[in-house]
Amino acid sequence: MSTEPIGFPSQLYPAFAPLPAPMADHLLLLEQRRYRHRPARRPADQEMAQAVLARIDLARTLVFEYLHPFVTADQKRQERGESRTFPNVDWLLETLVQYTPGQGGNAEATLDFWQKRGLLRREKTRGLLEITSVAALLVARLTEGTLQRNWLPSFLEEIEPFWWCYGRVSPESPIQAIPVPFPADLPSSMVLWTPWRGAIWDGTWLSIRTTFLYRWARSPSVEDLLLWQEEIPRKIQAVQHDTLFGRPAVQSILVQEARSDVLFAIAQKGSCHAESE
Amino acid sequence: MQNQSDYFINQELVEEMVRLNRQAALVTQEMGGVLAEQPEPAVFNDVLDLACGPGEWAMQAARSFLHFQVVGVDKSRRMIAYAQAQAEAQERGVMFRVMDITEPLDFADGSFDLVNGRFLLCFLKREQWLPLLTECFRLLRPGGVLRITEQESGFANDPIYQQYMNLWGMAWRKAGHAFAHTPAYIGVTVEMKNLLRQAGFVAPRHLPIAIDLSTGQPTHQPLLENLVEALKLASPFLVRLNVTTQKKINTLHDEMKGLIGKEGFSAYWLLQTVWSTKPGNNGMVAAASKAER
C-alpha cells in the first residue's frame, strides 16, 4: 500500500469547483494524514479521493444553499441603486468562528494573511470579498470541519486558476478541464459546464435545474452551433438572403436567440455532462 | 432557535441553518401547508412566528396569504440575518427581529391575531412553557389564536430507527425538556392543552400528524438524511448529557444512513398541532366558531 502523498488528477479538477486545485489537493492530503499512524488501514488512493470528493460535494451544496439568499438579496439591493455589502469581513469571520474549536476565531489579520497568500480574493472595484473565493473557503472549512489550523494550503500561486469547469468543442470531442478565468483562446464552439451552482451569480451561466450549469465559452457562430444542433442554425441559414430576416441586425438577434436555444437543448439533453457525472 | 447554551445544536453552523430550512419546508409540506388545520385562516392579519429559525414558515405564510403581516423572531442574530436575506431574495414582505422568546417580547399587548410556534421543545425546558404561553396570551388580541406544533417519538419496524428515537427520548428527558416519565416518548403534546388552559386560553383543539418516512415515500430520503445530519450535529449535546458516547453516535450515524433506501423500512414521525383561542371577540372568534359548527 502506497503512503506517498497523492493529488487529484487534472481531469477531476472541475469536479470540485469552486475549489482551486491546490485547495482540493490539500484536503486530500489531510485525509491521507489521518492514516499516518495506521498505514495498514489506509484505503486505496482512489477510494480516498472519492471520499474527499463526496465530502466536497456535500459541503458545496450546503454552502450554495446558505450563500444564495445573501447574494441574491445583495444583487437586488444593487438593482435598487443601493450599495452592495455582501460578503463582508465581519460576516465571514463570524461564519468561520463557528468551526474553530475553542471558539478562538480567525482575526481580520488572518483574512489579510490569506489574501496575501492568494487564498482569498477581493473585488477590485469595491474592495468587497470576492464571493467565489469566499465560497471556496467555506467549502474547504465545511469539508474539514475539525482542524483548528492548517485546513488550507499555505498559499496559492498567483497564476493558479480560481477554479475549473468542464468544456468540449463538439459532442464527439473529448471533455477538457478548463481554468477559470478562461483563457482568451478558447474555441468559440466550446460549451462549458460546472457542478458549482454558485456560478449562476455572475449571470453568464444557464441553470435549468439539472446537476450542471452551462454556458458558451465565447460567442458561437451559426457554423459553431451546427456542430451541436442542426435544426435551429439551419433555419437561420435558410433566411440568410431574405430581405427582412437577412438584415445584419435581425440576423444578430436570431443568432443570439439560437445560442440560448441550443445551449438550453444541450443542457436539457445532458449530452455534455453524461460522461462527467 | 435559541443560542448555543440552550439549543441542542450550534445553530449558527452553516450545516444547521440549511438543515433547519430544509426540514421546515418538508414539514410544512407534509402538514398540508402553513395553516392546514385552521378553518378560516384568511381571518388573520398580524402573525407572529416564534423562534422562526431561517424563516421558512413565516415566508411560506406570507406567500400563502398575501394580506398577512408576518413577523418572525429568533434569538440568533445570524439566523435572523439568514431569514432576512431569504425574505429579501424572494421579495417577501416579512419582518424578522432578534428576540429571545424565553424573555418578555418587545411587542405591545394585543399586537397579533395569530401566534405560531414549531419545535420549541428543542430549547424550552418544561418550566419555560407556561411563561411563554402566558406571554403569547398577552400578545394576542381577543379571539386570537395560538398554534403550537410539537413532535413526539415515532414508530418504526427497524431497531436502528427505534434506537435513534430512544436516544432523543433519553436526551430530552435528561435535559429537562420532556414531560413524559419514560424515554419512550416526549410527552409535550400530551401536556400542551393543560398548559394552554393554565395560560388562559380556551377551547384547545388538536390535530395529530404522522409523517411517513418509509422507503418509497417522497419524504423518505430527504427527511431521513435530515435526521441523520441532526444526530451528527447534536453529538456534543448528546455526549455532554452523558446519554451516549461519541463512538456510539458515530456507529448509529452510519447505521441510520444505511436505512436510506432500505427495502421494507417503515417509520412514522409523529407531530401534533394544538391550537387555542384567547377569550373575547374581535370577529375572528365568531368566524372560527361558525366554521367549527
Image (cartoon, rainbow, N blue to C red):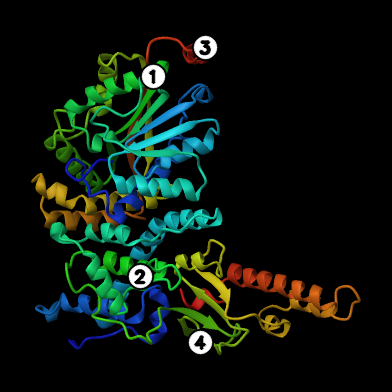
Relative image position of residue A168 (x, y in whole percent): 55, 83
Q: Are marks 1 and 4 in contact (CB under 8 Å)?
A: no
Q: Where does label 2 land, which residue?
A: A136
Which chain does tag 1 point to?
B
Which chain does tag 3 point to?
B
Q: Select label 4 or label 3 by which is in front.
A: 4
Q: Say if A141 sits above or below B221 in the image.
A: below
Q: Select label 2 or label 3 by which is in front.
A: 2
Q: Can see residue B199? A: yes
Which of the numbered marks, if any, corresponds to residue B110? Answer: 1
- Mark 2: amino acid: Ala
- Mark 1: amino acid: Gly
Q: Quadrant of residue B108?
A: top left
Q: Where does label 4 land, which residue?
A: A183
What distance separates the C-alpha of mark 2 from that of mark 4? 21 Å
Q: Earlier in the sequence, mark 2 or mark 4?
A: 2
Mark 3 falls on what kind of element? helix
Q: Quadrant of the N terminus of chain A?
A: bottom left
Relative image position of residue B122 (x, y in whole percent): 24, 38
